[in-house]
Image (spheres, rainbow, N blue to C red):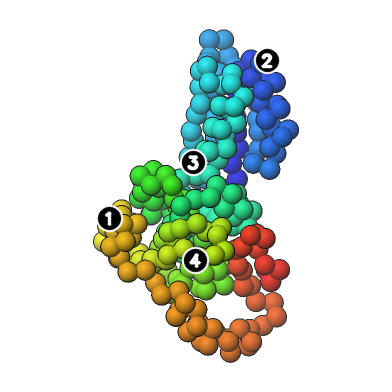
Amino acid sequence: SGSYFVARGSAPLKELFGRLAEENRIMGSFVFLEATAGESPSVRVHRGSGEEVELSGESTADPGKVFEFVRSQMLPLFGEIDEDNYNTYMAQRPAGMLWVCLSQASLKEDVARISPTFREVAAQHPSFFATYINEDLYSEHVRDELGCTEFPMVVLQVGDLTASEEEPKRYRLPLKEPSALEGLASWIVEAVEGRLKADDLEGAAEDEEDIHEEELEGMAANADIGRLDGNAISDEL
């Protein structure tokens, strides 16, 4: 779900927040509420599934601080990535991305089970974003870009995802066993420090091209094969 921003305060904050909203509608929905007597001014970001963060006190009178708070906090610690927010993630130029490939059949159950762990991990690694992606909607991206072969599976990409000169390093970890989720934090540290072997992306790309050529040619014209990219989503959806 998209982010929305709620400010509580008096006339000065209403004016400040109104200007911010007019200039940044693309970021989400903006709501202003009059504060009750004795209530301190605040700006609250609602994001993802039940995540909330707040800016309060004197900082709410500074337009620069309010904008930076909204901009830096608009994405959840762990949330779904899709065609509507992909470019927003990339615009933050993360040092890497932690993806969880999920199947539609068990998506709700899997998200409820793994969310606490991934929020904790994301808080420990603020230079990375933690997201989950629906394999049924974006099968091409999940299979070809992320290399997910079973579900659920976590994929860590380390490097600049917006750079065209060099592919980010990729590490994969199946999540079916409870022990994998328990050891996730250690696995990430080992990958970032170079103590794990990354995928051979060049070799994998050549193999996948041969394997999927007949499959892609034989797919029905209305098949959903989604790919997330800088243009949000392919026209095939």
Residue drawn at x 52%, y 59% is 161
Distance from the alpha carbon under mark 3 to that under mark 4: 34 Å
Residue 165: x and y in percent read: 54, 65
- Return the disc, 3 or 1, that comes first in the chain's sequence: 3
Residue drawn at x 39%, y 72% is 199
- Going by the numbered disc 3, the residue's amino acid type is Gly
Please give left or right for residue 35 compared with residue 174 in the image. Answer: right
Please give left or right for residue 178 compared with residue 127 in the image. Answer: left
Circle nearer the viewer, 1 or 4: 4
Residue 129: x and y in percent read: 47, 50
Q: Residue 137 shows which numbered tag? A: none
Quadrant, the C terminus: bottom right
- Give the residue number, with chain letter if any, for mark 2: 11
Dot 2: element: helix
- Going by the numbered disc 4, the residue's amino acid type is Glu
- Return the disc, 2 or 1, that comes first in the chain's sequence: 2
Residue 177: x and y in percent read: 30, 65
Circle nearer the viewer, 4 or 2: 4
Distance from the alpha carbon under mark 1 to that under mark 4: 24 Å
Query: Which residue is the extreme one toward the right?
Result: 22
Asked if the residue under mark 4 is in contact with the one under mark 1, i.e. CB atoms within 8 Å, the reply is: no
- Going by the numbered disc 1, the residue's amino acid type is Ser
Asked if the residue under mark 1 is in contact with the one under mark 3, i.e. CB atoms within 8 Å, the reply is: no
- Give the residue number, with chain letter if any, for mark 3: 50
Distance from the alpha carbon under mark 2 to that under mark 3: 28 Å
Label 4 CA crowd tier, 10 Å (few <14, some 14–19, many 20+): some
Label 2 CA crowd tier, 10 Å (few <14, some 14–19, many 20+): few
- Return the disc, 1 or 4, that comes first in the chain's sequence: 4
- Give the residue number, with chain letter if any, for mark 1: 186
- Return the disc, 2 or 3, that comes first in the chain's sequence: 2
Residue 120: x and y in percent read: 36, 45
